[in-house]
Image (cartoon, helix red, strand yellow):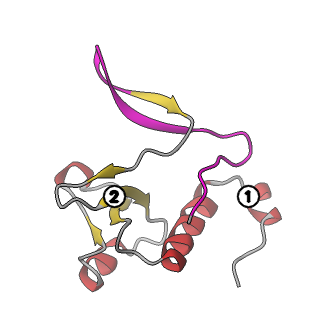
C-alpha cells in the first residue's frame, strides 16, 4: 500500500468543486476518484513517453479520457495495477519532476 506523503516540503493539490466552479486547491492527501466502472483511478505523468504502448498492452489498467488527450500522462485503474508496477510508475514520475539534487540523494529501486 502506498502511503500518502509529500517530499521536500511539497504538497498535494486537487481540482475541487467550489462556489466559483472548479478550483485547484491545496490538499493534505492525494485525491483518488472512482471511475464510471467503479474502479479507483488517478492520472499519472508519463515521463518515459510510452503511454500509447501501455494503453495498447494493458487497456484494462491504462487508459485516457478526452480531457487528458495531448497531456504527457495517462489514467491508471488503481484497483487493477500491481503494487510493484505502480511504485515504478510513481518513482519514474517523481524523478522526472524532482530537482536533480534531490533525486540524486534518493537511491534507485533495485
Which type of secondary structure does the marked residue at label 1 adopt?
Answer: helix
The residue that label 1 is drawn on is: 100
Q: Is residue 10 magenta?
A: yes
Mark 2 vs 1, N-terminal side: 2
Give the crowd class for mark 1: few <14, some 14-19, many >=20 residues within 10 Å: few
- What stretch of residues is rendered in magenta? 2-23
The residue that label 2 is drawn on is: 41
| Residue furthest to the top | 19
Q: Quadrant location of residue 31?
A: top left
Q: Residue at x 74, y 45 (%)?
A: 8
Q: Residue at x 29, y 85 (%)?
A: 57
Q: Is residue 14 magenta?
A: yes
Q: Residue at x 28, y 62 (%)?
A: 39
2 or 1: mark nearer the eye: 2
In percent of width and height, residue 103 lies at 73, 61
In percent of width and height, residue 35 lies at 23, 55
Q: Residue at x 24, y 77 (%)?
A: 59
Amino acid at each position: 500500500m502506498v502511503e500518502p506523503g509529500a517530499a521536500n516540503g511539497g504538497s498535494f493539490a486537487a481540482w475541487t468543486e467550489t462556489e466559483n466552479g472548479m478550483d485547484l486547491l491545496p490538499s493534505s492527501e492525494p485525491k483518488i476518484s472512482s471511475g464510471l466502472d467503479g474502479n479507483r483511478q488517478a492520472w499519472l505523468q508519463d515521463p518515459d513517453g510510452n503511454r500509447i504502448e501501455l494503453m495498447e498492452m494493458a487497456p484494462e489498467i491504462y487508459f485516457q479520457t478526452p480531457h487528458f488527450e495531448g497531456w504527457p500522462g495517462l489514467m491508471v485503474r488503481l484497483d487493477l495495477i500491481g503494487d510493484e508496477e505502480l511504485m515504478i510508475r510513481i518513482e519514474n514520475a517523481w524523478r522526472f519532476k524532482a530537482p536533480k539534487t534531490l533525486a540524486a540523494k534518493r537511491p534507485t529501486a533495485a
